[in-house]
Image (spheres, rainbow, N blue to C red):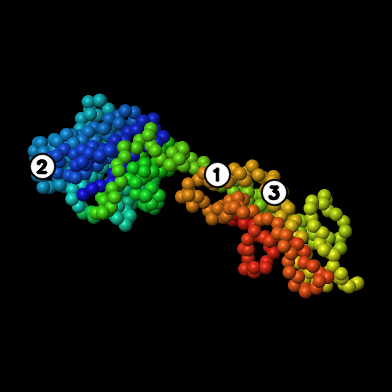
């Protein structure tokens, strides 16, 4: 069976990377090692998170990984079985003994270095044909991902919170992240082993606790976004774990293995992605732990400022409407400085003695008044665009710089507002006249401009609709 593989490790907010991992297959490829010909498995993967601070954690995890590398790559597996007295057909016992001896080796190293606190988590999986075998110690994770992208956890954390949940009690004020079983910390160690079947197209996800805040829905989103590329998927998963790790995120290491269904193209493997060489999309690689995407933040900030400007524009339009209404009702006094380019409504022959109510019933007066209001609003919009030209250009550049998948994460109201700011075809003044519904040659229809688009249900509506952000 063929596999897609991807590995990545991130240092996070720590001074050094205490994680270690190992991936090997029957055929050597970029990003993995080659199993020994006598190794009974098709693929072996392990992740280990060292603990103890300083160089002690690095030594502990490296010791566990190097022990497994000797068994599966250097060809000592059969000799080890004989020396441990392990039956070759009992895979559960074999994997229990592998974890147990890894524990003994870390304990021996701690005694040799005279270090009290030196330990490592241990998550090992091996695949052969359509069967998987695993061993688990600590709070790392092994997830069986079906071809339908359904998460099936194979391991349960060995920490206070998980122990309390298994016992059916509340963890209280205890530190929920404190590990209860770990390689090297002396005394007996809890080792979980298991096996099962998997189908073509299924995958296995191994990661240390630095990435445990990334959820199933995130994985599916990452998988779809990267087109199934295993290296990018693993790197994105590890990077996201660091970004969600708080002020001082832990190291995060991810191994992703997926069996390839017959007929599907195998994506070429890539080298291991580490902190110093991670090649992620720009919008991910430029983030710092806990930092929001810069371009998204800039767009949202401009959106808030633009919403404020639109609010002021609306208030100004209402004030202008009030001034025009006062003038139409006979108020001859000017209020403040006259608004530039306000068009006078056409003169209407009214019978002497008629009041405002009679005038409002005249369709020619109503059409002319609406057209004047439209022109006044266009004047204000043009002036607002001129005053905010630099900011509008900045929004357009920020929008164009975003990848399409990142544009889709913005709220719909934000996208609509950006489209309003940067129209493809700005509305132009129309020179055509409007048919005179009154049918009189002595009452020609006033010249007007059509709105940019008809957003209302009535095709003859003269109202210019301005999108407003609801966020």
- The residue wearing badge 3 is 384
156 relative position to 279: left or right:
left
At x 73%, y 66%, the residue is: 434
Q: Which residue is mark 2?
A: 86
Give the CA separation, mark 2 to mark 1: 63 Å
- The spot of residue 318 in percent (x, y) is 73, 57
Q: Is residue 58 left or right of residue 83?
A: right
- The foreground one among 250 and 218 is 218
* Left or right: 368 in relation to 33: right
Residue wearing tag 1 = 398
Residue plotted at (31% across, 57% down): 148
Disc sitting over residue 194 in the figure? none
Residue 380 vertical position relative to residue 358 in the rendered view, above or below: above
Instruction: Judge whether 184 appears above or below 204 on screen.
Output: above
| Residue nearer the viewer, 198 or 386 | 386
Mark found first going from the N terminus, 2 or 1: 2
Question: How many other residues sit within 10 Å of disc 3, few (<14), some (14-19) or many (≥20)?
Answer: some
Query: Residue 86: which quarter of the image?
Result: top left
């Amino acid at each position: 069976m063929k596999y897609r593989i991807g590995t990545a490790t991130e240092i996070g907010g720590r001074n050094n990377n205490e994680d270690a991992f190992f991936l090997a297959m029957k055929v050597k490829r970029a990003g993995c090692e080659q199993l020994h010909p006598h190794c009974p498995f098709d693929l072996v993967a392990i992740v280990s998170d060292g603990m103890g601070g300083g160089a002690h954690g690095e030594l502990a995890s490296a010791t566990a990984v190097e022990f497994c590398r000797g068994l599966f790559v250097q060809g000592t597996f059969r000799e080890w079985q004989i020396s441990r007295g392990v039956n070759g057909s009992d895979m559960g016992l074999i994997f229990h003994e592998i974890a147990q001896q890894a524990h003994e080796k870390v304990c021996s190293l701690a005694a040799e270095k005279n270090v009290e606190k030196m330990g490592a988590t241990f998550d090992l999986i091996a695949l052969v044909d359509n069967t998987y075998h695993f061993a688990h110690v600590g709070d790392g994770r092994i997830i069986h991902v079906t071809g339908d992208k359904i998460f099936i956890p194979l391991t349960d954390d060995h920490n206070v919170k998980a122990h309390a949940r298994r016992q059916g009690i509340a963890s209280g004020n205890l530190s929920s992240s404190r590990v209860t079983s770990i390689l090297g910390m002396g005394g007996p160690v809890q080792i979980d082993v298991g096996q099962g079947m998997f189908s073509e197209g299924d995958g296995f996800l191994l990661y240390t606790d630095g990435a445990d805040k990334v959820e199933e829905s995130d994985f599916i989103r990452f998988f779809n976004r990267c087109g199934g590329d295993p290296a990018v998927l693993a790197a994105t998963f590890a990077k996201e774990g660091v970004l969600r790790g708080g002020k001082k995120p832990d190291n995060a290491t991810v191994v992703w293995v997926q069996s390839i269904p017959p007929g599907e193209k195998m994506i070429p493997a890539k080298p291991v992605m580490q902190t110093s060489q991670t090649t992620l999309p720009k919008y991910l690689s430029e983030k710092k732990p806990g930092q929001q995407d810069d371009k998204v933040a800039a767009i949202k900030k401009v959106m808030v400022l633009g919403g404020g400007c639109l609010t002021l524009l609306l208030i100004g339009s209402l004030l202008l409407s009030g001034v025009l209404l006062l003038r139409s009702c006979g108020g001859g006094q000017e209020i403040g400085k006259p608004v530039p380019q306000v068009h006078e409504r056409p003169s209407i022959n009214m019978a002497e003695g008629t009041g405002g109510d009679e005038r409002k019933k005249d369709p020619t007066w109503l059409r002319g008044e609406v057209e004047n209001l439209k022109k006044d609003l266009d004047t204000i919009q043009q002036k607002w665009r001129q005053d905010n030209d630099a900011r509008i250009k900045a929004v357009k550049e920020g929008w164009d710089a975003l990848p399409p998948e990142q544009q889709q994460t913005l709220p719909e109201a934000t996208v609509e507002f950006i489209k309003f700011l940067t129209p493809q075809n700005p509305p132009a003044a129309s020179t055509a006249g409007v048919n005179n519904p009154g049918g009189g040659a002595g009452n020609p229809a006033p010249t007007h401009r059509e709105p940019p688009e008809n957003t209302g249900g009535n095709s003859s509506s003269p109202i210019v609709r301005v999108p407003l952000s609801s966020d």
